[in-house]
Image: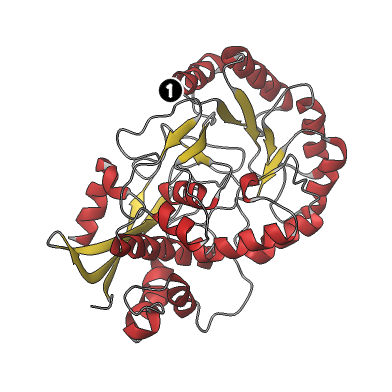
Amino acid sequence: MPVRIVDIREVTKPIASPIRNAYIDFSKMTTSLVAIVTNVERNGAPVVGYGFNSNGRYGQGGLIRERFAPRLLEADPRSLLDDSGENIDPDRAWATMMANEKPGGHGERSVAVGTLDMAIWDAVAKVAGKPLFRLLADRHGRRANPRVFVYAAGGYYYPGKGDAELRAEMRSYVERGYTVVKMKIGGASIDEDRQRIEAVLDEVGTAARLAVDANGRFDLETAIAYAKMLRDYPLFWYEEAGDPLDFHLQASLAELYAGPMATGENLFSHQDARNLIRYGSMRPDRDWLQFDCALSYGLCEYQRTLGVLQSHGWSPARCIPHGGHQMSLNIAAGLGLGGNESYPDLFQPYGGFPDGVRVVDGHITMPELPGIGFEGKADLHAQMKALAA
């Protein structure tokens, strides 16, 4: 029986926290959780694909309900099928969602589409009876690698949080098996941030490397001042110094900062990714790209982005997506990315890994769960089941 979408449900969920980075606080942060219900049954229940958007961008319920979900529901079900006629074609579903949309304007729209795209891929892999990472590897003629590098993101500014608390946080990540940890900078003075960096480096020693993230806070003068300060330390990377679309700033930094840099989490299309490579002087031998499919039109667009990167001499292994969610873990394992971000203590239950998955020497091993694997994370699946019930 051909697959058909019979219902799409959305709810806005809070992922609020009193933390802040250099640019925003997360006191009112939300995410959109969606469920795409199909007519296919497994074990006496309908196959449901789930999706949500990453932290840092708010829930997109209005766009999902008003534009993109109706287009899927109103389409001829046969127009969404793949060539076999037995499963949904994610690319045809994506084209249906984007029908009558002008090019450009990659902002909130890309988040709404990315959320639904995640749910579509989850459903497609479940109907196929495969983990998504194996489905992707098969489609691309690759060998899946279930072992994925992950790093621990944290080090946010928090009321009453001093160097002792920051040290304890980073120590806890190392104790849980991470070999790279990340902290925020740019939300304090440069002297205070230097002190915070030195405290973390002293704490983790040789057990882990440190990455720093300015979340796009700096103008060129400040970005350069920080770059000169950061050159004193063996950092894993210097992340998003300035506005994500200020390619001149990024290129200027590359002239005087020899260490690895990272950016891309706030670029939401393959066109923007191409401009970063063309004009940002990113270096494929050392820099990292952080495009997040859940914020940038989904996996269909992410595959186009990878195509752009490869055409400019970049390996997928230089991509470590933002977001810390299981969708990017599957992409990393299936398409050979360099790894994935992880939030061990934040933005739950949406971040993290399926229950029982542990970090060993900075890596996790993907479980053999159909779809994206949300059903293996009990606290997250409980919210998803409630939406689909």
- Of 180 and 64, nearer the camera is 180
Residue at left offset 77%, top offset 44%: 219
Q: Is residue 8 above or below residue 1?
A: above
- Of 224 and 85, nearer the camera is 85
- The percent coordinates of residue 209 (x first, y second) are 62, 24
Which amino acid, by three-letter code, is at mark 1? Arg
Quarter of the rendering occupied by the N terminus: bottom left
**Quadrant in which residue 60 is drawn:** bottom left
Residue at left offset 50%, top offset 82%: 99
Local secondary structure at mark 1:
loop
The residue carrying pointer 1 sits among few (fewer than 14), some (14 to 19) or many (20 or more) residues within 10 Å by Cα, namely some
The residue lying furthest to the right in this view is 255
Q: Is residue 385 left or right of residue 318?
A: left
The residue lying furthest to the bottom in this view is 76
- The percent coordinates of residue 272 (x first, y second) are 68, 62
Quarter of the rendering occupied by the C terminus: bottom left
- The percent coordinates of residue 253 (x first, y second) are 82, 41
